[in-house]
Image (cartoon, rainbow, N blue to C red):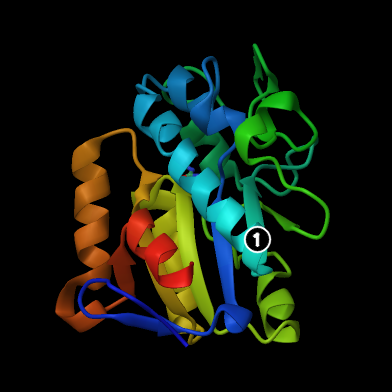
Amino acid sequence: MTVIKALPYDFTCDIKNTALVIIDMQRDFCAPGGFGERLGNDITPTRRIIPAIAALLNLFRKHGGMIIHTREGHLPDLSDCPPSKLARSKAKGAGIGDVGPMGRILVRGEFGHDIVEELYPIEDEWIIDKPGKGAFYRTDLEAILQRNGITSLIVTGVTTHVCVHTTVREANDRGYECLVVEDATAAYDIADHEAAIQMIHQQGGIFGWTTNCDKIIQAIQ
Ligand code: C5J
């Protein structure tokens, strides 16, 4: 068993039953001209975590742990995008399906929808395309985890208070033990990130545990 120093107390897992989950490290959230930036956000925080996620990705690749990448996005005809989500996405100028410098925003198959080069999936890594914020909603994620005997998730990616949080809450309700990596997750606003991290480990770990990248590397190596 691997014991990782974490809050609110040590996180214990067996790497064979643990998946590294990388949430939405797509150009639309992390690259200049993407959806995140066009909504008026500074993308520096989402880019800053790329090296920490890459370190965990390499660790899992070396030790043979399961790796899951997610991408938020919609079918080209937007038939899987609720009208409410579509309308609110347009409230600040650039909306889902609109044409931007990297193609149509948050549309599957477009350049901006894909994962940044530094973290690009390789063979045998799972890619979950999700129409919602949570990675379990209208995806095969739960079936994939069950089929592979996964009981624990190490969660990274963006944004901490939106897609990371929704996924962790969905996973927690399904009985998965979630460890969220504070320096491998980010929100555009640091206050949102810090509040989201605090919410996960409060009340004795109401949604799971939090730690940092070095502690995971130390424990697994
Ligand atoms: C958002 C996400 N923030 N990946 N998506 O719309 O958190």
Q: How many marks?
A: 1
Please tell me which residue lies in front, 131 or 59.
Answer: 59
**In the image, the residue with mark 1 has its CB under 8 Å from the nearest atom of ligand 1:** no
Q: Position of residue 96 (x, y in %)?
A: 60, 30
Compared to 144, does 192 lie above or below? above
Q: Position of residue 7 (x, y in %)?
A: 22, 72
Q: Position of residue 165 (x, y in %)?
A: 39, 59
Compared to 209, does 27 lie above or below? above
- Rate crowding at label 1 as few (under 14), some (14 to 19) or many (20 or more) other CA atoms within 10 Å: few
Residue at left 66%, top 31%?
A: 117
Q: Quadrant of residue 142?
A: bottom right
Compared to 42, does 189 lie above or below? below
SS for dot 1: helix
Say which amino acid is labelled 1: Lys
Please tell me which residue lies in front, 183 or 203.
Answer: 183
Left or right: residue 101 versus residue 154 is right
Q: Which residue is mark 1?
A: 62
Residue at left 75%, top 58%?
A: 125
Compared to 77, does 18 lie above or below? below
Residue at left 65%, top 11%?
A: 101
